[in-house]
């Protein structure tokens, strides 16, 4: 069953670091069978107060693959880079 990682950036402090993060994360996500479905772009709140600066949605073959990406040695330095440059909420949800 596919699984989705949804990232909601609430504060982006360093555009250069975030660009470096995106470049590196592209390959790491792909190495774990993932792909990007949404990677920024305009968004519109239809209901409620949720208004992130940026949204990202990644699809993985299953939740184990998504967890493997997040916990991987390849992602660890990128995660630290992202955390130093932004505030982001990330959730993992299984599809149907």
Image (tube, helix red, strand yellow):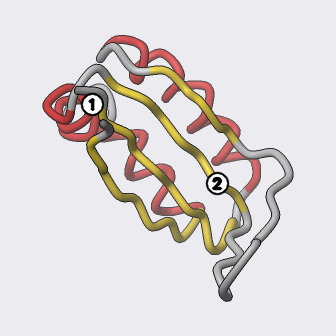
Seen in the image, is 32 located left or right of residue 68?
A: right
Going by the picture, which residue comes out furthest to the bottom?
49
* Residue at x-position 39% and y-position 44%: 5
* Residue at x-position 35% and y-position 40%: 77
Q: CA distance from mark 1 to mark 2?
A: 18 Å
| Nearer-the-camera pick, 2 or 17 | 2
* Residue at x-position 40% and y-position 20%: 34
* Residue at x-position 56% and y-position 38%: 21
Residue 95, position as x, y percentages in the image: 32, 39
Seen in the image, is 58 located left or right of residue 43?
A: left
Q: Which residue is mark 2?
A: 55
Residue 64 higher or lower than 43, as above or below: above
Q: Classify mark 1: residues with Cα within 10 Å, few (<14), some (14-19) or many (20+).
A: many
Seen in the image, is 38 located left or right of residue 88?
A: right
Q: Earlier in the sequence, mark 1 or mark 2?
A: 2
Q: Which residue is mark 1?
A: 69
Residue 88, position as x, y percentages in the image: 50, 65
Residue 78 higher or lower than 88, as above or below: above
């Amino acid at each position: 069953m596919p699984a989705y990682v949804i990232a909601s950036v609430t504060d982006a402090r360093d555009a250069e670091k975030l660009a470096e993060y995106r470049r590196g994360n592209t390959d790491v996500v792909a190495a774990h069978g993932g792909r990007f479905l949404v990677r920024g772009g305009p968004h519109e709140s239809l209901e409620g107060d949720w208004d992130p600066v940026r949204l990202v949605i990644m699809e993985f073959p299953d939740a184990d693959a998504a967890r493997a990406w997040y916990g991987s040695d390849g992602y660890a330095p990128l995660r630290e880079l992202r955390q130093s440059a932004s505030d982001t909420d990330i959730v993992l949800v299984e599809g149907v």
